């Protein structure tokens, strides 16, 4: 015999479930877009090209699964970037290139579009995943950016994974430093995502420019230059010649053109990337708007990139003509 309490429980389970009460939330899009650097990729062996495709797809699927399961866009951005930072084929984390003094210095930033909270780190050398430290800065400190020794100390005291600099060692990237081949240069990695609550987040992580002077900081940790996120507008992560991205505040400039000029994210991204090309500045951007629509624009022959949307769209590309 079914008791009244059992009937009541079934009623509550079936009809008062938040998913039933908030049916509008089910129709809200979730989406994620990733870049693995703009550049040439011309002389890479096929095994590495295949590895880049696989790395992009892994990061894409991990981030998208988090979004599908109701996690925040911050979680998706951080975890997708961690995948890329742990992959030596990308110029971030373990795959970071060398300075002119044959050391590795890494930068990262993350931003939350609901209130423009942001965190960044620059010039770290022993932090396994700089993007996680950037998120810690955003959520657990009163500041936005830490650099050098201060960032390293914060990483140690906050329980971040610290590794010996040998973890980042790469004979191949040292050889790249010595030869400075233009046709195989890689850039920053970045992710932009929107979750079921409509929150846009963006993050960027990099090992910087090969052969850079020690202490040089590019656009990746600069909020507004390499990273921007704003609910109701768009989120951006950039890759390319950081000095120009800083000078022209590229990430925020794209979103401002969407916000104040009424441009689509495709048109705004195209305009800014073409303006960079006109001054011989290499680069690319990924952009996501409130509907999960995407723009992936670059002025180099290739940009490693991937995109997935809850409407079923999924793509992973490197070259321009794909």
Image (cartoon, helix red, strand yellow):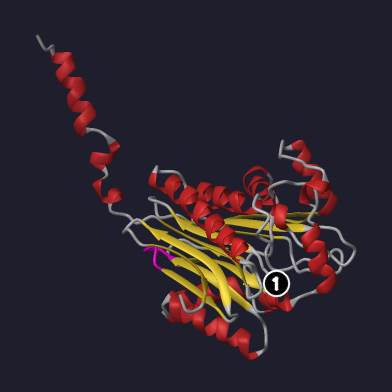
The front one of 98 and 49 is 49
From the image, which quarter does the N terminus lie in?
Answer: top left
Residues in magenta, as a range: 289-293
- Residue 92 seen from this side: yes
Residue furthest top in the image: 1
- In the rendered image, which quarter contains the C terminus? bottom left
**Place of residue 227 in the rendered image (x, y in percent of width and height, measured from the top left):** 60, 64
Label 1: which secondary element? loop
Q: Residue at x 72, y 36 (%)?
A: 159
- Whether residue 112 is visible to the viewer of this picture, yes or no, is no
Q: Position of residue 48 (x, y in %)?
A: 62, 62
- Residue 58 is inside the magenta segment: no
Residue linked to disc 1: 185
Q: Quadrant of residue 220?
A: bottom right
The residue shown at (28%, 53%) is: 27
Q: Position of residue 187 (x, y in %)?
A: 67, 68
Q: Which residue is pictured at 60% across the width and 80% down the height?
A: 300
Relative to 89, is 78 above or below?
above
Give the farthest residue toward the bottom: 278
Describe residue 139's horizontal placement relative to residue 180 as left or right: left
Could you tell whether 153 is left or right of 285 in the image? right
Q: Nearer the viewer, residue 139 or 153?
A: 153
Q: Is residue 133 above or below residue 104?
A: above
**Looking at the magenta stretch, what is its main secondary structure?**
loop
- In the rendered image, residue 110, in percent from the top left (x then y), is placed at 61, 56
């Amino acid at each position: 015999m079914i008791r009244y309490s059992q009937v009541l429980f079934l009623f509550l389970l079936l009809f008062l479930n938040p998913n039933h009460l908030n049916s509008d939330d089910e129709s809200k899009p979730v989406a994620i877009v990733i870049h693995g650097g703009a550049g040439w990729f011309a002389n890479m062996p096929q095994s590495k090209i295949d590895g880049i495709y696989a790395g992009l797809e892994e990061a894409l699927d991990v981030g998208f699964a988090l979004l599908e399961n109701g996690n925040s866009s911050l979680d998706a951005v951080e975890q997708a970037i961690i995948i890329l930072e742990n992959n030596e084929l990308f110029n971030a984390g373990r795959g970071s290139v060398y300075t002119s003094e044959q050391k590795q210095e890494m930068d990262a930033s993350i931003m939350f579009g609901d209130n423009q909270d942001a965190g960044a780190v620059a010039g770290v050398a022993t932090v396994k995943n700089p993007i996680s430290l950037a998120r810690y800065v955003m959520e657990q400190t009163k500041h936005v950016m830490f650099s050098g020794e201060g960032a390293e100390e914060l990483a140690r005291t906050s329980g971040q994974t610290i590794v010996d600099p040998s973890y980042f060692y790469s004979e191949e990237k040292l050889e790249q430093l010595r030869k400075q081949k233009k046709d195989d240069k890689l850039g920053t990695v970045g992710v932009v995502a929107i979750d079921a609550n409509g929150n846009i987040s963006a993050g960027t992580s990099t090992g910087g420019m090969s052969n850079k002077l020690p202490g040089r900081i590019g656009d990746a940790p600069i909020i507004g230059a390499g990273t921007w996120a704003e609910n109701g507008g768009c989120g951006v992560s950039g890759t390319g010649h950081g000095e120009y991205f800083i000078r022209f505040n590229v990430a925020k400039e794209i979103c401002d053109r969407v916000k104040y000029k009424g441009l689509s994210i495709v048109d705004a991204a195209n305009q800014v990337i073409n303006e960079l090309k006109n001054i011989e500045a290499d680069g690319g951007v990924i952009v996501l708007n409130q509907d999960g629509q995407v723009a992936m624009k670059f002025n180099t022959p290739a940009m490693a990139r991937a995109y997935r949307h809850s409407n079923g769209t999924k793509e992973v590309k490197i070259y321009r003509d794909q």
